[in-house]
Image (tube, rainbow, N blue to C red):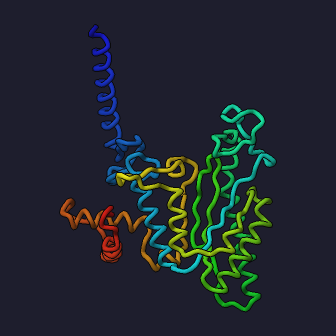
Amino acid sequence: MSRPTELTAEAVASGVVAAHLDRLWLEPRGYKRCPHCRQLLPLTVSRCRRRRCPGYSATWARDTMRKIRVNLQTYGGLSCVIAATAPGEETGLVWDRSKCRHPTGERCSGPKGCRVEERAAAVWNQASRRWWRELNRICKQRADRATRRLGATRKGGIVMYEWELQKRGVWHLHVVLGMETAIERAWAYEYVQALCEVAPTKGFGFIDRKPLHTPQPAEQSARYLSKYLAKWRADGSLELTETVKSAGRTLLNYVNRSLTAKSGCTMRSLRSVRLVWAWREGRIPDHGLDVIDFLVALCLLEQSEPARGP
């Protein structure tokens, strides 16, 4: 009767020994393992900062949602959120019928639990980043030329964009366009028109242009984007979405550099905010930041929501 207990103890012991040997092998080489995701880290790094690391993903999501909110508040004007989706079965993103749960003969869709065939989804997901760069460049050029023909010395542009993983297993984009001034509205209309014309040649599918006709305050766009990352539960904890937890995108959220230059709110500065908070609370002896980074982090810290902290 004691055998299972002995095996369990042996398994635990072997795991401890393996971890100890792993540490002895890594430390002389300047590395250690994250206790949460087991990825290699330099000894000089205090913690893992990978989006998918279970020990850091909630912090990453809070920082990203705050970056979205602060920078769109800095923009402050009217905006619209345009969706650019992946194509359908006609281009090869066929449904994996073995995972469908609905009756035979009923149309497939992501909300019903249907998934695109894994290999087809992987091919599109891998190529879509390059296709998006090409598509965005062409559409920006067309919009810039159109506003120059109107005699504008300034032009509009993308305020922010964010990737979201659809339930069917492929990524798609939410693009925030500025709509506050007449030039920005003209630029946005030309940009979206170019998206609709060029998207099929660059691997994308449907472009939702309806939001162009109903601009909304930037704060509403911030809430719209944030819900695709995480939602607050009643107990104050975060429920992370599959977009945050899934691989396939190094950069999920992009903010126009002109906005981050005004707000000072970037992922790097938000990490500095936590250092300054810990230093001010007496939890660490020194924040280790230079004067400029310290002042920016201190200003952002003073703007934090008191109920949730940095």
The x and y percentages for residue 165 are 59, 51
| Vertical comparison of 191 with 246: above or below | below
The x and y percentages for residue 197 are 80, 67
Depth order, front residue of 90/286: 90
Residue 33 visible in the displayed image? no
Identify the residue shown where x is 77% and y is 66%. Answer: 196
| Vertical comparison of 63 with 181: above or below | above
User: Which quarter shows the N terminus?
Assistant: top left
Quadrant in which residue 3 is drawn: top left
User: Which quarter shows the C terminus?
Assistant: bottom left
Left or right of residue 277, residue 172 in this image:
right
Quadrant in which residue 104 is drawn: top right
Residue 203 visible in the displayed image? yes
Left or right of residue 108, residue 301 in this image:
left
Depth order, front residue of 290/242: 242
Identify the residue shown where x is 33% and y is 33%. Answer: 19
| Vertical comparison of 113 with 144: above or below | above
The x and y percentages for residue 43 are 33, 50
The x and y percentages for residue 184 are 65, 82
Identify the residue shown where x is 75% and y is 82%. Answer: 146
Q: How many marks?
A: 0
Left or right of residue 79, residue 198 in this image:
right
Quadrant in which residue 122 is drawn: top right
For this orientation, the residue located farthest to the top is 1
| Vertical comparison of 173 with 3: above or below | below
